Image (tube, grey):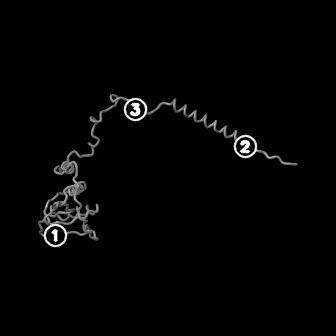
Amino acid sequence: MAKQKRTSTGSTFYGVIAGLLIGLSAAAAVAYFVMNSPMPFVDKASRSAADSPMDPKQSPDPNVGLVPATASKPAQQDQLGELIATLPATPKAAPPLPPPPPAPKAPLASATVVAPPGDNKTYFLQVGAFSVLEDAESVRAQMILLGLPVQIQRAEVNGMQVNRVRVGPYERLDDMNKARARLAQEKIIANVIRQ
């Protein structure tokens, strides 16, 4: 007896057609559901300005609780604001500077300065000297953000104008060493200047 081969192309075709019809009907049901559901953002976008609960210009200051009622040092209240107010609106392009000399390998912050007894000198920590004033102002702003007293001293060195950024003045070595350690934490090299 001869065996008969059976083909399954007919049942596969009907299976594909049935799957397409089921998928199409599911997609139509989802589309119908989405189109008839309320849109959550449409109502909010169509509000007028008169419906808004509060004018942003009249809103209370959210930072009012962050500032203490009495400042301990009123002279240093807003040095950063004063610095920003003195900066020009558009910075000038500075001429290229020669590369700085290589930094020493040993950390300078670990060394402490020992003063002879009875020394009534004033100490500064010089954190930079710049020919362009804007660069010096930038470093000064960084020192103000660290909470350190800072000033820029102008001098002429080898016929060139130099802006020295100095932290201080400090009359006690302990205070100067604490400031130097704080600068070392920020990886800022500071040289001790005694006047």
- As shown in the figure, which amino acid type bears the numbered disc 2? Thr
Label 3 secondary element = helix
Where 17 sits versus 164, above or below?
above
Q: Which residue is mark 2?
A: 9
State the separation of the CA atoms marked 2 and 1. Answer: 101 Å
Label 2 secondary element = helix
Task: Determine the residue positioned at 19% across, 66% down.
Answer: 192
Instruction: In this rendered view, identify the residue nearer to me: 167 or 120.
Output: 167
Instruction: In this rendered view, identify the residue nearer to me: 131 or 64.
Output: 131
Residue 45, located in which quarter of the rendered image? Answer: top left
Neighbour class for label 1 at 10 Å: few (<14), some, many (≥20)? Answer: few
Instruction: In this rendered view, identify the residue nearer to me: 91 or 49.
Output: 91
* N-term-proximal mark, 2 vs 3: 2
Q: Which residue is mark 1?
A: 115
- As shown in the figure, which amino acid type bears the numbered disc 1? Ala
- As shown in the figure, which amino acid type bears the numbered disc 3? Ala
Task: Determine the residue positioned at 46% across, 32% down.
Answer: 39
The disc at residue 94 is none
The disc at residue 45 is 3
Task: Determine the residue positioned at 70% across, 42% down.
Answer: 12
State the separation of the CA atoms marked 2 and 3. Answer: 55 Å
